[in-house]
Amino acid sequence: MREQFTKQLTHLRQDLIGIYTDIDLNLHKAMDALNAGDKQEAREVKRATRAIDKRCEELEDSAYQLIALQNPLASDLRLLQFFIYVDFNLQRMSSHVRNLARFAKRLSDKNVPPALIELLQHQADLVYMLLSVTVKTMAQNNLAEVAELPKLEKPVEALYKGFYKAFTQLKTPEEVDAASKVLMASRMLERVAGNALQIGERLVFLLTGNREPLSEFANMDEEELEDMYVGQNPSLQKGNKKIEKMTSQIPEVADDQEVATRVREALELASKKNPFEKDAAKPKRKKSSAS
């Protein structure tokens, strides 16, 4: 019976990371739809997120059923709590991506200043990085990766706040209408980043048994991090080939140097750029490799 229980936990973990991967891919598609003014792709993202919601509901039901039927040990219960907590955040992320697709549809026929779209894309690029690092920590159960999450989340929030500065320069009702929708799209990206950060914080509890703030890991060396791990559930060591295959679908995250450069550029853009300056026509962007 114990072996069967481990298999069930392994499958739940695979399902969880599969859902996370699909949210990441649909976030790329939602941003592609927004940049291209593609209503059809936005509709497809909305349908996909509704299917993701259903998978989240089924995963939650399965986790509670295992708690009720299997009399879990401490490590089992901590893992099941992790599944339920992360599942809740994935439901919120799915909802945010769906809302982003809605704003993509509404902005398709609006004259949005190119600089606002550029600012939003910088924010999305940072969110992509944050999601990629988060799923990597989940797949590898690596505390060292967790320390990187706040570094990526902070400029996402700063860029969101940067959109408020744009409103001091609004002059026409058309500008107000377009900018308000871009602002809400930025809010969706900021909330996705916040949910990813909460997943990272919960992973710390799963791996250490303690509720430590992520900032505690920033300056720890490898030996100090190793001492923090507690005994792990056997299911965390199983099914990793399937998990690796799922996460390989996510577009590659940039290396450390490029991440640092992107963060610096994004913060400079949020603090200095005038979103309503007279730019040329909206630049064409390549579609995400997730599309």
Image (cartoon, rainbow, N blue to C red):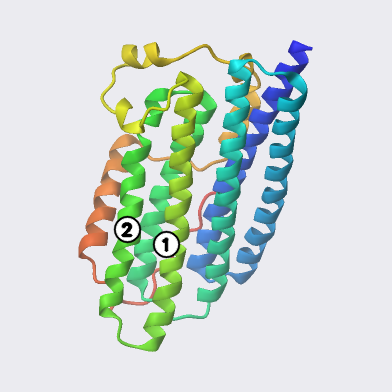
Quadrant in which residue 69 is drawn: top right
Q: Position of residue 209 (x, y in %)?
A: 47, 20
| Residue at image location 45% in from the left, 34% down from the top | 200
Q: Position of residue 5 (x, y in %)?
A: 74, 18
| Residue at image location 48% in from the left, 21% down from the top | 207
Q: Element type at marker 1?
A: helix
Left-right relation of 277 to 13: left
Query: Height in image: 104 above or below 210?
Result: below
Q: Residue furthest bottom?
A: 172
Which residue is denoted by mark 1 in the rendering? 186
Left-right relation of 273 to 116: left
Q: Amino acid at mark 1?
A: Ser
Tag shown at residue 204: none
Which residue is denoted by mark 2 in the rendering? 159
Quadrant in which residue 268 is drawn: bottom left
User: Looking at this view, is 226 or 263 the one in front?
Assistant: 226
